[in-house]
Amino acid sequence: ETNEWLLAKFKSLGLSDVHAQPLDLPPQWMPKSWDVTLTGGGRTIHLESAQPDYYANGLPPGGLELDAVYAGLGTEADFAGKDVRGKAVFIYSMLGLAEQNAVKRADEKGAAVIFEVSMLPGNMRYQAYPSGTKAPAFTFGNDDGVLARQMIEAAKDGPAPKVKVTLDVEKVPNLKTALVWGTLPGATDETIYIAAH
């Protein structure tokens, strides 16, 4: 439908030689379902804004239940003295802050799942670019991130809160897309192609 709309729009603008050039796609990453809850201190919270990073690895059927670890901004100083191997690691990022490579650092230190919280006001949902990590990474909005941090803080020297996380993904083969393009007639012998990416 998008291709047809663009073809008609390009023709109505006076472009000539308008084409929809079909392209084969590699298997496409499709998250089928996911869920994140945090339990501690006698209460359970559902982290509504959780969104898996694009191309995140899926989790085993039934998901994982892991200890939650707070790792601040995810710098080496934040990880100092913390054992994150096989745990759910919460890191926090802020618009304007220099890139900390926190997600990759958490992965290198053995995190089983990584949660990156955006500290912009509210509880936005957004999908990050591929993290390139073995451990699946998720993004969270600030409101959920604050709740998670408070629950981890409340545990103090007691048992860490537990994160229950599921992520079922599928890679769908044999899909196609198209590049829509046409030629813009000009007053010279120069050829201008307009392409919709």
Image (cartoon, rainbow, N blue to C red):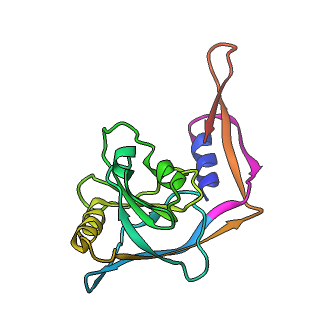
Residue in view at x 25 percent, y 82 percent: 41
Q: Which residues are magenta?
A: 12-29
Task: Decide which of 159, 190 is in the foreground and name it.
Answer: 159
Task: Give above or below for 121 relative to 46.
Answer: above
Image x and y of residue 15, in percent: 63, 34
- The quadrant in which residue 98 appears is top left
Task: Give above or below for 99 relative to 104.
Answer: above
Residue in view at x 43 percent, y 61 percent: 83
Image x and y of residue 58, in percent: 60, 68
Residue in view at x 30 percent, y 38 percent: 96
Name the magenta segment's main secondary structure.
strand
Task: Decide which of 48, 98 is in the foreground and name it.
Answer: 98
- The quadrant in which residue 42 appears is bottom left
Quadrant position of the C terminus in the picture: top right
Residue most extreme to the top: 188
Residue most extreme to the bottom: 42
Task: Give above or below for 38 relative to 53.
Answer: below
**Residue 20 magenta:** yes
Quadrant position of the N terminus in the picture: bottom right
Q: How many marks?
A: 0
Task: Give above or below for 100 relative to 121.
Answer: above
Task: Decide which of 195, 30 is in the foreground and name it.
Answer: 30
Image x and y of residue 70, in percent: 33, 61
**Residue 162 magenta:** no
Residue in view at x 43 percent, y 48 percent: 102
Image x and y of residue 165, in percent: 47, 75
Task: Decide which of 182, 175 is in the foreground and name it.
Answer: 175
